[in-house]
Image: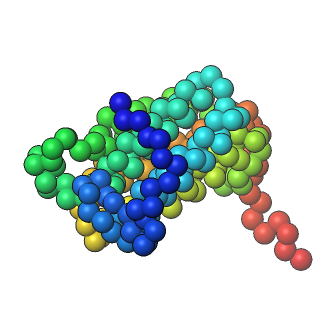
Amino acid sequence: MVVLNKIYTKTGDAGETALGNGARVAKHAMRVTAYGTSDELNCFVGVARLEASGDVDAALSRIQNDLFDLGADLCRPDMEKDAEAEYPPLRMADSQVNRLESEIDAMNDALEPLRSFILPGGSALSAHLHVCRTVARRAERLSVELATMEAVNPAAVKYLNRLSDWFFVAARIANNGGKDDVLWVPGANRT
């Protein structure tokens, strides 16, 4: 077990940070932006958990752990060198994507089909899950952009795509099984 007893490192004072392979890069590098956004998402999931209980809270706990796995994956470049690494790098797996899909399917079975776009809100939990959904979409966009520059684990991008879907469906569940969803009324406020 690693024991951290420093509150500050001072190693980033010059605007650089270390990646998972030890390479130093600018703190604004696309890879850092991508995994930093997954960390931001994890924080929003923690806030959502303040309103969650039971199965939803357990699922959000799993997602938080997955998001640390995702950060570990994204912070480690040079996937082609994984076999040479001193320790096997942690990479997202298709099984994590499949679990999200199974959970989405189970939640969807409890919902009436959606006949309108919905607005973020309703219950407090639903509102928090919609924030998670949008941050997950941003993390996905950044990871896709990173993949145009460097190799990125395809399972990591798929996970983020399914995760935003998971948050959308879970937000509907949190709104009394969709009964309390706030429906969009196109042009409702035009004069």
Quadrant location of the N terminus in the rendered image: top left
Please tell me in which quadrant of the rendered image residue 55 appears: top right
Point 77% across, 60% down: residue: 185
Residue closer to the observer: 109 or 34: 34
Q: Residue furthest left?
A: 84
Q: Residue furthest bottom?
A: 191
Display colour scheme: rainbow
For residue 12, above or below residue 62:
below
Quadrant location of the C terminus in the rendered image: bottom right
Q: With 137 as the anchor, is 90 left or right in this view?
A: left
Residue closer to the observer: 169 or 93: 93
Measuring from the top left, give residue 61's x and y in whole percent: 52, 32
Q: Residue furthest top?
A: 54
Measuring from the top left, give residue 96's x and y in whole percent: 36, 37
Measuring from the top left, give residue 94's x and y in whole percent: 30, 40
For residue 48, above or below residue 80:
above
Point 23% across, 44% down: residue: 89
Please tell me in which quadrant of the rendered image residue 66 appears: top left
Point 31% across, 58% down: residue: 19
Residue closer to the observer: 166 or 183: 166
